[in-house]
């Protein structure tokens, strides 16, 4: 049934997360949907359970459970609430930035409190003027008094209004492959606030992905992540190695909810004196939805499993994001068709699934970007694969314009 290697330990974690999601998260979904309120305590509870540190090495206090475990965790949260799946993955992503590019001192300083749920990090890359095109960013850091002064406004930052550590990528030179650098910025540094109030979103209601402003924020040299000029690599490697599978897992959780709620609806609703599920047009749609979900799951679990095994798998990770978004939204449309008019109203979960499925298009690379990167890999014109570089770490400068 599974594309990856699912062990008893994975099943145990999955059951634990499912129970948390169904008992602690599910009762809050209606409130989040109605108000868009950000559930700070739920996000922190996820952190306190050690789930942000699920891939962190036990030597730094983490669970060390790997990437298959991580996608199962995100999927189970997203099955009940896309917003909570998105919240968990958003802070798991910067863990990779610290783990792959941090010095030993930085790993010792930041990974244990993240694993313990005392620190919640964000990844702050996107700006109003630059999304997929990392090189278009304008936020700047300049050397000053033994450190750096940062000025930037970062948009759509996952957990923007909850987190207390920001992993910020900003411009440190005018142009060239080494013109961006990455910084760890504590949220209580002078100039980090105010956060702009969140703008209501059509989907993932309850997830905070707003703007964080850094106005003349001074950070010491020890907060530079990697070397000066490594910013593009810090961002891209985390996005490829963690972001692709993480967002694929949110899609898969929403996909599972889409299939489950549509099957239940079709079995319960009566038309022509029998359940709707007996109509062949409905069965065709249900069968296609199940097929979509099985394919999406296999592609995602296989990619995560390859990453756990240290295999070369950048393409598989990109494909996992692409396939999970594309097939998840295709199933959401089929599910809406089975529900017909009933699907349009907020008393049924399908309309939330439809909106949340679409929300996965942009983060960690749109479908256009995944296809572009897959083509470059196939043509041999892409960058060296991150999954290979981090098996035998090399800090290559990468001339790449898409994220
Ligand atoms: C739920 C969610 C969570 C997010 N979390 C974070 C976060 O935690 N931190 C963060 O920094 N950002 C985050 N983002 C922002 C996300 O990374 C960007 O939305 C993404 O990089 C795309 O940028 P954009 O939205 O500006 O679209 P653009 O890049 O402007 O794209 C617009 C259109 O042009 C197409 N396009 C762009 N470039 C190319 C190309 N080279 N070839 C072909 N087509 C192209 C796109 O496919 C799209 O259709 C999040 C976004 C969402 C929706």
Image (tube, rainbow, N blue to C red):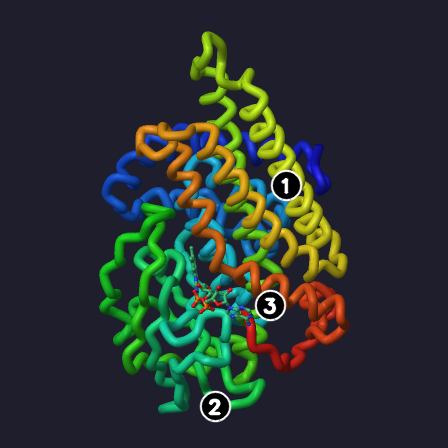
**Is there a contact, CB below 8 Å, between mark 3 and mark 1?**
no
Q: Identify the residue at image location x=67%, y=79%.
A: 396
Q: Nearer the viewer, residue 152 or 166?
A: 152
Q: Which residue is mark 3?
A: 237
Report if residue 114 is visible in the image: yes
Vertical arrangement, residue 388 with respect to residue 267, above or below:
below
Q: Which of pointers 3 and 1 indicates the residue nearer the eye?
A: 1
Disc 1/disc 2 C-alpha distance (Å): 42 Å
> Residue 266 location, x and y as percent?
48, 21
| Secondary element type, mark 2 | loop
> Residue 329 location, x and y as percent?
51, 45
First in sequence, mark 1 or 2: give its number. 2
Q: Is residue 177 left or right of residue 118?
A: right
Q: Identify the residue at image location x=31%, y=33%.
A: 346
Q: Identify the residue at image location x=28%, y=79%.
A: 215
Q: Identify the residue at image location x=30%, y=72%.
A: 213
Where, by quadrant of the figure, is residue 29 drawn? top left
Q: Which residue is mark 1?
A: 297
Q: Is residue 215 left or right of residue 290?
A: left
Vertical arrangement, residue 304 with respect to residue 188, above or below:
above
> Residue 154 location, x and y as percent?
36, 70
Where, by quadrant of the figure, is residue 188 drawn? bottom left
Quadrant assignment for the N terminus: top right
């Amino acid at each position: 049934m599974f594309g990856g290697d699912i062990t008893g330990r994975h099943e145990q974690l999955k059951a634990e997360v499912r129970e948390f999601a169904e008992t602690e998260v599910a009762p809050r979904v209606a409130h989040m949907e109605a108000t868009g309120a950000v559930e700070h305590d739920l996000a922190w509870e996820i952190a306190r359970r050690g789930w942000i540190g699920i891939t962190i090495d036990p030597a730094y206090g983490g669970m060390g459970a790997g990437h298959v475990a991580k996608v199962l965790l995100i999927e189970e949260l997203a099955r009940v609430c896309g917003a909570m799946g998105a919240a968990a993955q958003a802070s798991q992503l910067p863990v990779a930035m610290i783990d792959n590019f941090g010095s030993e001192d930085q790993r010792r300083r930041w990974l244990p409190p993240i694993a313990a749920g005392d620190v919640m990090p964000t990844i702050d890359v996107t700006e109003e003027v630059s999304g997929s095109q990392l090189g278009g960013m304008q936020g700047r850091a300049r050397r000053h008094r033994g450190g750096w002064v940062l000025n930037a406004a970062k948009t759509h930052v996952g957990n923007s209004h909850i987190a207390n550590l920001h992993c910020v990528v900003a411009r440190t030179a005018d142009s060239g492959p080494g013109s961006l650098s990455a910084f760890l910025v504590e949220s209580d540094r002078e100039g980090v606030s105010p956060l702009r109030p969140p703008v209501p979103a059509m989907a993932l209601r309850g997830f905070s992905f707003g703007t964080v402003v850094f106005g003349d924020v001074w950070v010491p040299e020890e907060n530079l992540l990697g070397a000066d000029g490594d910013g593009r690599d810090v961002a891209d490697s985390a996005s490829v190695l963690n972001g692709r599978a993480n967002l694929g897992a949110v899609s898969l959780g929403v996909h599972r909810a889409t299939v489950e709620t549509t099957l239940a609806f079709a079995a319960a609703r009566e038309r022509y004196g029998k359940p709707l599920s007996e109509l062949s047009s409905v069965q065709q749609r249900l069968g296609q939805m199940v097929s979509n979900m099985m394919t999406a799951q296999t592609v995602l679990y296989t990619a995560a499993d390859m990453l756990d095994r240290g295999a070369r798998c950048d393409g598989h990770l990109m494909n996992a994001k692409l396939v999970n978004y594309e097939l998840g939204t295709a199933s959401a449309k089929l599910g809406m068709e089975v529900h017909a008019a009933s699907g349009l109203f907020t008393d049924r979960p399908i309309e939330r699934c439809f909106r949340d499925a679409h929300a996965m298009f942009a983060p960690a690379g749109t479908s256009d970007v995944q296809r572009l990167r897959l083509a470059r890999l196939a043509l041999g014109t892409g960058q060296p694969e991150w999954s290979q570089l981090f098996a035998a770490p090399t800090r290559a400068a990468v001339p790449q314009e898409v994220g």
